[in-house]
Image (cartoon, grey):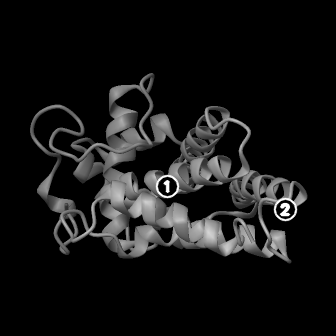
Amino acid sequence: MVSAEKPAASSGARRGSPGEGLPPTTLVLPGDEPTAAALIAAAVEVMAVHGYHGTSVRDIAAAAGTSPAILYHHFTSKQGLLATMLDRGLDVLIAATEEALDLAGEDPADRLRAVVGAHVRVHLESQRESLLGNSELRSLEPGARALVVAKRDVQQRIFDRVVRDGVRRGVFGADQPDDAARFVSTACTAVAAWYRPGGRLGPDEIVARYEEIALDAVRYGR
């Protein structure tokens, strides 16, 4: 993790390959060009400490071990880089949730456990990315923000459908299924704000707890 002091603009690029020494991030895809991947990883690392507006292109380039001009070969701007990061973050979350739901079977309780488990686990494993996605959505220009919000709504609709289906089938007793679904997804997202690796509860324990909390929230079996 980077220190609270931003990389100095005058210190030059890191030695070695671009991105060398940076923590991995779920926002880098297997097919990414190495320098583009390094810039994404560096942006996650620096923005997680200083925020979007407190981070310059020079800061990102220095952390990535390259020059500021190189960023514009891969992204239209710092704004374009942020848009890519937040867009990919939602893609990772939606893909994990849909995969878990596909494997869950037809029982409404199992289906809710599946989407809650996937959502919580992604936010635990992509903690910095999740916090950036929530805090820096406001920093996106309107067009990019609309795309990210639309994908966020796709994720919420997965929760909505699962809870509504459970209510329709008499398995969940929630009087307000959409409110219950929103409560559950919001609580699951919030784990990124308080989770500390190496703390009293490990990821599996947190996932199991949140699955049961979600079932209580929708009044499972009542």
Q: Nearer the viewer, residue 202 or 87?
A: 202
Asked if residue 159 lies left or right of residue 37, the reply is right
Q: Earlier in the sequence, mark 1 or mark 2?
A: 1
| Above or below for 170 versus 190 | above
Dot 2 corresponds to which residue?
167
For the question of whether residue 57 can be seen, the reply is no
Dot 1 corresponds to which residue?
78
- What's the residue at 12%, 57% (across, down)? 11
Q: Which of 94 and 146 is in front in this view?
A: 94
x, y percent for residue 39: 36, 44
- What's the residue at 62%, 72% (across, down)? 216
Residue reaching furthest to the right? 168
- What's the residue at 9%, 39% (across, down)? 15
Q: Tag 2's secondary structure?
A: helix
For the question of whether residue 135 can be seen, the reply is yes
- Location of the C terminus by quadrant is bottom right
- What's the residue at 38%, 60% (across, down)? 127
| Above or below for 41 versus 45 | above
Asked if residue 3 lies left or right of residue 201, the reply is left
Disc 2 marks which amino acid? Val
Q: Are marks 1 and 2 in contact (CB under 8 Å)?
A: no
Crowd around label 1: few <14 · some 14–19 · many ≥20 (10 Å): some
x, y percent for residue 119: 54, 54
Q: Which of 70 and 30 is in front in this view?
A: 30
Task: Single out the mark in the foreground, 1 or 2.
Answer: 2
Disc 1 marks which amino acid? Lys
| Displayed quadrant of residue 35 | top left
| Above or below for 88 versus 4 | above
Crowd around label 2: few <14 · some 14–19 · many ≥20 (10 Å): many
